[in-house]
Amino acid sequence: MRPLIEMTNQTTILDPKLEQTVSQLRCIECGAVHKSASRTLRCPSCGDLLEIIYPAWKTSGGRAAGLNASELKALWRQRRSSRAAVDQSGVWRFREVLPALASGHEAITLREGNTPLYEMPRSARIAGVPHLYAKHQGMNPTGSFKDTGMTVSASFARQEGFRWVACASTGNTSASMAAYAARGGMRSLVLIPDGKVSWGKLSQALDYGAVTCQLKTDFDGCMRVLNEVVERMPVYLLNSINPYRLEGQKTAAIELLEQCDWQSPDHVIVPGGNLGNSSALGKAFLEMRELGLISRMPKLSVIQAEGANPLVRTVRETSGKRLIPVQAETMATAIRIGHPASWKKAVRVLEATGGTVEQVSEIEIAQAKAEIGADGVGCEPASAVTLAGLKKLVKQGFVKPSETVVLVLTGHLLKDPEFTLKFHRGDLFSGTPLESQAAILAAHERAPIVLDASADAVVKTLEQAETLADEP
Amino acid sequence: MRPLIEMTNQTTILDPKLEQTVSQLRCIECGAVHKSASRTLRCPSCGDLLEIIYPAWKTSGGRAAGLNASELKALWRQRRSSRAAVDQSGVWRFREVLPALASGHEAITLREGNTPLYEMPRSARIAGVPHLYAKHQGMNPTGSFKDTGMTVSASFARQEGFRWVACASTGNTSASMAAYAARGGMRSLVLIPDGKVSWGKLSQALDYGAVTCQLKTDFDGCMRVLNEVVERMPVYLLNSINPYRLEGQKTAAIELLEQCDWQSPDHVIVPGGNLGNSSALGKAFLEMRELGLISRMPKLSVIQAEGANPLVRTVRETSGKRLIPVQAETMATAIRIGHPASWKKAVRVLEATGGTVEQVSEIEIAQAKAEIGADGVGCEPASAVTLAGLKKLVKQGFVKPSETVVLVLTGHLLKDPEFTLKFHRGDLFSGTPLESQAAILAAHERAPIVLDASADAVVKTLEQAETLADEP
C-alpha cells in the first residue's frame, strides 16, 4: 500500500545548479575556518563562537554562483503546496541557504516554521504606528521559535552518528530538543538546577522522553558539568551556541521577507535573551541582501527586560566592545539571562542593520502582553517586550509613524499561563508603587466576576461592560 | 505604502461557476428547512439540532453542479502558496464547500488549519499497525481543533451584526472563542461554574479579553442561564451545537484527505466528548464522496473515556436509538461530558461510515499519551484516547494490521502540563491496584533524577539509561 505521506525527508537539492550549500565553520573572533566543530562547539584556536559560512556565495561578486534570486523565490513558494515532509517544513523549504545534509541522510522535521504574520490593528493604535505586524514564532510545534533551529541541529547530530543529545536548560530549549530527539530516534539529556526550576516548564521534556537530571548547583554549574560530559561521552551539545541551530532560526527572517513579498519592513523588533535569535535573524537579512533577494535591510532592534539587560548596558556603556554581565531577574523567564552567549554576534547585527536596543519594566511587559492578547494573538511574557519596547522607540523618534514594523513573538501564550492568570487577578504587582496603579486597574477589568446563577445578573454585567470603553 | 499582508479576508469566490455555497439550515430530526436559526440555534419547529446543507449539490445526480472534483483539488492546493490571509487559512481555502459570507463581509482568521499529518513509527509498532498517522489539530493557533470551527462561526456572528459572542465552557472552547472575538473586534462572554474550574484553563480567555462570569451553579446551570441571556440580549451563542462551527471543523477531514492525496485511509479515530467534532469530520467524508473527491469512505470510530462513555453505552445498549447520559468523570477534561449535545449526528456518522465505538481506562489514556510523546508529538490527555482505543480495536480485529489508520489529536500538549508532570512523577495513579503497576513503573523511568553536580554522576546515569531498552 502506498504510504499516505511521502516519507522521505531527504534534503538533497534536485536542481544541481542550485547546489551551493557547501558550508564551513568560521570563528567570529579569529576568523579561523574549520571543517567541523569541537565537542563544545567553540573555536579550537581561540575558544570563541563559530558561525556557518557559504564560501561559494562569494565567487561571483556578492551574488551567489548559480543562485538566481527570482528562481529561489519561485522555488520556495512552490514548495508550500508540495506533499513532501521536507517541503512542508518552513525551515527545510529554504534548504538552498542551509548547510546540506549528506546524501542518504534525512531531516528530522515536525513541520516547523510557516508561522503566521499577523496584522495587529489594536496594538498599532496603541503604539502609534499604523503598519504593525507580528511574526508569531510561538506557533511552532512545541510552542517556541526553538523548533526552527532544532530541526537543523538535531538532523546534523543524527547524521554524525550521535545517539544522545543534551542541553542545560529550564524551558523552551529542553522542550524542543526532547521533541526532535524523540522524532529522530535519539535519546536526550536535560540538566537543570535542583529546586530552582518550574516543573511546568519541564512537562514537555518529560512527555517527549528526555532523561532529566536535577543537579545540586545553579545554571552555570549545570553548563560546566555538561561541557565535561560532552567531552567524555558521545553526546551532542544542543545549547544556543550551536551554529546549526542559528542556521535554522534564520529561516524565520527569510519567511518573513517572503510574506512581505520581499519588500523589507523598516523595523524588526526582537526580544533579547541569549541573543542567538537576534543573531540568526540578522544573519538572514544580511545573506538575503548578499544574494540579491532584497535590496534594503530592515533595522533589527533588540528589547530586553530592565532586570536582564546585559546587551543594553553593553551597547550603552561600552559601545558594544565588552560584555557587561548582570544578575538577571525578570518574570519574562525566557529572557532571564545575564550572561548572553551570542552577545558579539548580536552587536554586529545591530551595527550592520542600524538597529538599536531598549529596556522595559515588568509592568510595561505585562501591559503589552495584555494588549497583544486583545488583538486575539497570545504570547508568552518575553515576547511582549517587543511591543513595550516599540512604544518607547516611537516616543524617541527612532521609529517613525509612517514606517512598517514587525514584532517577532517567540513563544506561545500557553508556555506561561501562570503569568496571565496572576496578572488578570491583580496578583502580579501587589505591593507596587502608586504610579503603577493605572496599569493594574486596567488589568482588573478582565478579572472574573462571581455572580448568582441568574440571567438578570449576567445581563447587568453585560450592560456594564458595554458602557466601558473596550478600546484602551 | 503597500501593506505587507494582503489584508482582505473576503471569501467571495472569484470563479462564478464555483459559486455553489448557497446554504440552508435543516433540522436533523424533523427535516424542516430554515433560512436562519433561532437565538438558541435549535429548530424552531421541534427543538432539535440544525445542520447546514447545500441544495445546489443535489441538482446534477449526486455531483455538485459546476463543482468539478479535479478543479477543486487543484484550486485548494494552489491556495497554499497564496499570500492572501483567507487563502492561508486551512479552513477558508476550502470555501467552495463552506457557507459563503455575504459580499463585503470578511472572514475572521488566525491562519487556523493547515495542521500536520505525522507518521507515528513508535506508536505504530506498539499498536501493531504499520501504517499509522496522526492528524494534529492541537497545532491550531489557540492549541485545539476548536479554532477551525470558530473562524467560521465568529465570522457569521459579525456578519449578522453581533457585538457580543458567548459560550458556557471551561476550556478549549472559551479560549478559541475569546481569541476570534478579539480578532474580529467583538466582545466575548464566558460563563463558568463557580469554584469547579481550573484557573489554568481560563488564562487564554482572560488574555484575549473575555468577560468571565463565575456563576454559583454547575455547568448545566450555566447553560440554562446562557440560553436565557441570548434570548434577552443581542449575544451570539457559540456553543458546540452551532452548525457554523461544525462546518469549519469539517475542513480538517478535507485537509486530511488532501494530505493523503485523496486516497482515503481505512480508519479515522476520534476522541468523543460533545461529539460535534466526530459529526463534523463524518459530514466532510460524506460530502467529499458526494462531490466525487474520494471514491471510498474511511471508517470513523469514536473513543471515549470509561468514566465519560455516554456514546459507547448509547450504541451498545440502545443501538443508538436513545441517549444514555452519564455522570462524567475523567482526567481527560476535554472529553469529560456526560450528556453530549451532538449524539444523534455522531450515531449517524458511525452508521454511514461503518465505524465503531470503544472506551478506555484512565491508565490506558496516560500510557498512550506517553507513547505518543515518545514519537516527538505531544498532545493533551483527551487526544490520547485515540491510540489507547486503537490498541483495543486491533486486538478485536476491527482494525487489520494491513490497514491505514489516522488518529485525530485534538489538543496541544501545553493545554494540560499538570497531567504530564503528575504522570511522570508517579503521582497520577498512587493508590491504584497492583495490576496497573507496570504502567506506573514505565512512567517512572522518565521521572527526574536528583544528582550531585558532577560529570561522573551524569555519565553514570547516561550509562544506566543506555542499558535500558529505549523502545517499549
Image (cartoon, coloured by chain):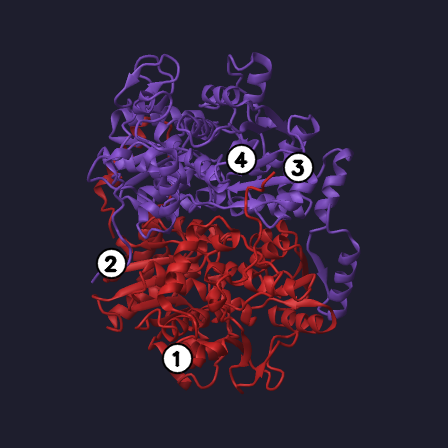
Chain colours: A purple, B red
Q: Residue at x 78, y 61 (%)?
A: A463
Q: Are marks 4 and 3 in contact (CB under 8 Å)?
A: no
For label 3, the SS is loop
Return the residue nearer the eye: A367 or B82: B82
Of all chains, the one bearing label 1 is B
Residue A129's label in the rendered image is 3
Tell me the quarter of the image containing the N terminus of chain B: top right
Question: What whole-number distance in Å separates the C-alpha atoms at marks 4 and 2?
Answer: 42 Å
Return the residue nearer the eye: B75 or A44: B75
Same subunit, labels 4 and 3: the answer reads yes
The image shows residue A133, relative to residue B257, as above or below, that is: above
The image shows residue B58, relative to residue B101, as above or below, that is: below
- Callout 1 amino acid: Gly
Instruction: Between label 1 and label 3, give the one nearer the viewer.
Output: 1
Question: What whole-number distance in Å separates the C-alpha atoms at marks 2 and 3?
Answer: 49 Å
Per the image, the residue denoted by label 1 is B62
Instruction: Between label 4 and label 3, give the one nearer the viewer.
Output: 3
Which of disc 3 and disc 2 is earlier in sequence? 2
